[in-house]
């Protein structure tokens, strides 16, 4: 057993040191019932990533949607037959600039990565969606607690989520859909947030003291992620400090 653990650690460290991307998937804990579904393509989603998200082959997606090219359009709807419960496929890139994780709410009742990408583009944000990750609340065709990876993260671009203290250059921006000045964070969203933050902080060696709400950044004038955000419960779900 010890030998196996050692081998796993060595493989992990080798992959980081050689600059390879570490792909992380989270298998849902609920019943693994397969069903047909539809998927609206979010920014930077590829056939490969969508095939991993639903545990189906690229070949099947292409055949069932009469695709003759692997190029997808943002917002395009794909039919996914016999799909497993969706799971996030999160890449972790060797990169020294990520020193903080900043938590936001969308301050809207509904939304997803695709809709925020549209609204951020309309507001003139360079590179669209300003966050690196979005955690859905069960609206706009997404599951409650679904983690969406932004194109900004795939391309390892600076954020457009917190100008204060120059955080856009060094902080990973995670947005939960909802208005937590008024409503409660759902249990599924909080579970997904803790899962994602634990993964990110362990890989990028980010201490708990650098995981902060937007409104707690020095000189940020906002109550984001809302006065009802359950900080105590969130902290209790984080693994011990690094
Ligand atoms: Zn915010």
Image (tube, helix red, strand yellow):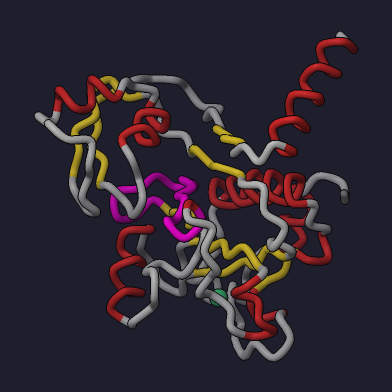
Q: In this view, does 128 lie above or below 66?
A: below
* Residue 11 lies in quadrant: top right
Q: Is residue 224 above or below residue 195?
A: below
* Residue 169 lies in quadrant: bottom right
Identity of the residue furthest to the front in this view: 18
- The one of 54 and 169 positioned closer to us in this rendering: 169
- The one of 45 and 137 positioned closer to us in this rendering: 45
Q: In this view, does 1 lie to the left or right of 224?
A: right
Where in the figure is residue 115, as x and y percent of width and height? Answer: 30, 64
Q: Quarter of the picture for ligand 1? A: bottom right
In the image, the segment drawn in magenta is: 138-153
For the point 35% across and 29% down, which residue is it?
51
Question: Which quadrant is home to the N terminus?
Answer: top right
Q: In this view, does 125 lie above or below 85?
A: below
Q: Is residue 212 magenta?
A: no
For the point 62% across and 37% down, which residue is it?
20
Q: In this view, does 121 lie to the left or right of 211?
A: left
Where in the figure is residue 241, as x and y percent of width and height? Answer: 87, 51
Q: In this view, does 100 lie to the left or right of 27?
A: right
Identity of the residue furthest to the left in this view: 66
Where in the figure is residue 5, as x and y percent of width and height? Answer: 83, 17
Q: Does the magenta stretch include residue 146?
A: yes
- The one of 212 and 123 positioned closer to us in this rendering: 123
């Amino acid at each position: 057993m010890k030998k196996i653990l050692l081998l796993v650690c060595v493989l992990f460290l080798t992959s980081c040191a050689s600059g390879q991307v570490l792909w992380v998937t989270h298998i849902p804990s609920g019943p693994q019932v397969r069903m047909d579904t539809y998927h609206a393509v979010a920014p930077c989603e590829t056939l490969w990533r969508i095939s991993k998200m639903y545990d189906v082959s690229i070949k099947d997606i292409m055949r069932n949607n009469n695709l003759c090219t692997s190029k997808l359009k943002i917002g395009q709807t794909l039919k996914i037959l016999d799909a497993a419960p969706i799971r996030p496929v999160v890449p972790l890139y060797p990169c020294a600039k990520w020193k903080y994780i900043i938590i936001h709410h969308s301050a809207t009742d509904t939304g997803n990565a695709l809709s925020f990408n549209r609204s951020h583009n309309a507001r003139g944000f360079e590179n669209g969606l300003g966050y690196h990750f979005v955690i859905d609340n069960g609206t706009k065709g997404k599951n409650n607690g679904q983690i969406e990876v932004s194109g900004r993260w795939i391309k390892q671009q600076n954020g457009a989520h917190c100008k204060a203290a120059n955080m856009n250059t060094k902080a990973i921006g995670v947005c939960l859909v909802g208005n937590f000045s008024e409503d409660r964070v759902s249990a599924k969203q909080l579970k997904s947030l803790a899962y994602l933050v634990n993964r990110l902080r362990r890989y990028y060696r980010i201490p708990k003291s650098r995981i902060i709400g937007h409104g707690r950044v020095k000189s940020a004038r906002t109550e984001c992620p809302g006065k009802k955000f359950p900080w105590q419960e969130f902290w209790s779900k984080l693994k011990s400090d690094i």
